[in-house]
Image: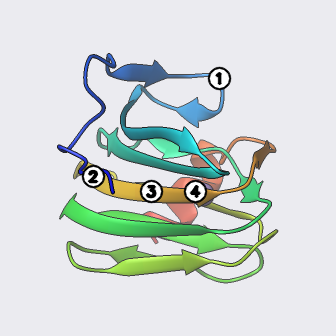
Amino acid sequence: MKILRGRENGAPSNPRSDTFTGTVWMDPVVAPTDGVAVNTVFFPPGARTHWHRHTEGQLLLVTHGRGYVQSDPDEGSWVLPGDVVYVPAGEQHWHGAGPESYLVHVAVSLGTTEWSTEVTDEHYRSLLNP
Ligand code: MN
């Protein structure tokens, strides 16, 4: 048994930029173990992931703010605190904040992540500011 105290002891918050739009902060809840990574992720308004897939899938537990998720070819959906998003293995998708609200979710990521292209400003605005 291991009790996780909210974030891995001594691990710094990790600003991400290569595969995200905007400055996204990730806090490891627990170091990746047996192909499972658990991170708390903070997206400021407008920030989002690039399109990507998880080889074994992902669960997103929305805790604060207001955000948006989209799978290809789905239209996507707003997400609010309490919502849990299940992304099946290999499904192309992105997730991020709304244009006027931050988003915090806990991401349980399984396997490895395969990154693709950015979610363009044009695409993001067409979905979130129709
Ligand atoms: Mn994902």
In this view, the residue in front, 130 or 128, is: 128
User: Relative to the observer, which residue lies in front, 107 or 77?
Assistant: 107
Tell me which amino acid carries mark 4: Ser
Q: Quadrant of residue 12?
A: top left
Q: Residues within 10 Å of mark 2 (few under 14, many from 20)?
A: many
User: Is label 3 in a helix, a strand or a loop?
Assistant: strand
Label whose residue precedes the other's in the sequence (4 or 2): 2
Quadrant in which residue 20 is drawn = top right
Asked whether residue 18 appears in the rendered view, the answer is: yes
Q: Position of residue 104 (x, y in %)?
A: 27, 52
Q: Nearer the viewer, residue 10 or 127?
A: 10
Distance Cα–Cα, label 1 vs label 3: 18 Å
Compared across the picture, whether 71 is left or right of 128 comes to: right
Amino acid type, mark 3: Ala
Where does label 3 land, which residue? 107
Answer few, some or many: residues within 10 Å of disc 3's Cα (few below 14, many 20 plus, some between 14 and 19): many
Q: For the N terminus, which image quadrant?
A: bottom left
Q: Amino acid at mark 2?
A: Val
Quarter of the picture for ligand 1?
bottom right
- The answer to whether mark 2 and mark 3 are in CB contact below 8 A is no
Q: CA distance from mark 4 to mark 2?
A: 15 Å
Amino acid carrying mark 1 in the image: Asp
N-terminal label among 1 and 2: 1
Residue 93 image offset from top left, x and y in percent:
68, 64
Q: CA distance from mark 2 to mark 3?
A: 10 Å
Q: Ligand 1 near label 4 (Cβ, under 8 Å)?
A: yes
Q: Nearer the viewer, mark 2 or mark 3?
A: 3
Task: Write down the residue under mark 4.
Answer: 109
- Which label is found at residue 18? 1
Residue pictured at 65% horizontal, 23% vertical = 18
Query: Residues under labels 1 and 2: Cα distance?
Result: 19 Å
